[in-house]
Image: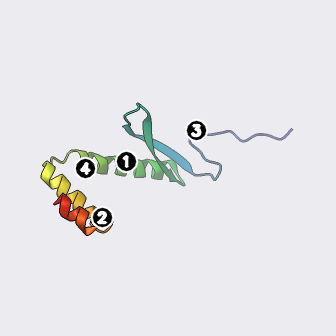
Amino acid sequence: MAQQKKKTKNKLPSGNIRIQVYDYTDVDGRKHYKSFTAPTKKEARFLATQWAAGKADMTAENITLYEAVTRYIDVKRGVLSPSTVAGYE
């Protein structure tokens, strides 16, 4: 009988390590996670920690509704039609 390799938690068949970090819960109550994959556990944790720190910085920012709408229009300007942008402004 052939020996089976010991399965390690979070280890993928490719040999990489996958770390999942909680992101948010949607309106239906379903939890969503962000996944990070790297050759070592240390690297995967580093990527996850870096993402979580960046997300914390974004959520801590207090902006007005006007600023939020202006940012949205600026981001979507290339996709939206000129009449839609004019209507939003």
Mark 2 secondary-structure assignment: loop
Q: Nearer the viewer, residue 22 or 47?
A: 22
Mark 1, residue position: 49
Between the C-alphas of marks 2 and 4, the distance is: 25 Å
Mark 4 secondary-structure assignment: helix
| Mark in the foreground, 3 or 2 | 2
| Mark in the foreground, 2 or 4 | 2
- Residue depicted at x 51% and y 52%: 37
Q: Position of residue 27 (x, y in %)?
A: 37, 34
Assign the N terminus to one quadrant of the image: top right
Q: Position of residue 58 (x, y in %)?
A: 25, 49
Question: Which mark sits nearer the N-terminus, 1 or 4?
Answer: 1
Left or right of 85 in this view: 50: right
Question: Which mark sits nearer the N-terminus, 4 or 3?
Answer: 3
Q: Nearer the viewer, residue 84 or 66?
A: 84
Between the C-alphas of marks 3 and 2, the distance is: 45 Å
At label 2, which amino acid type do we have?
A: Leu
| Mark in the foreground, 1 or 4 | 4
Question: Which mark sits nearer the N-terminus, 3 or 2?
Answer: 3
Mark 3, residue position: 9
Mark 1 secondary-structure assignment: helix
Question: Which mark sits nearer the N-terminus, 2 or 4?
Answer: 4
Q: Position of residue 78 (x, y in %)?
A: 30, 69
Mark 2, residue position: 80
Mark 4, residue position: 58
At label 4, which amino acid type do we have?
A: Met
Is the residue marked by circle 1 packed among few (<14), some (14-19), or many (20+) residues within 10 Å? few
Contact between marks 3 and 2 (CB within 8 A): the answer is no
- Residue depicted at x 41% and y 51%: 46
Left or right of 3 in this view: 59: left
State the image quarter where residue 89 is shown: bottom left
Question: Exactly how many numbered labels are in the figure?
Answer: 4
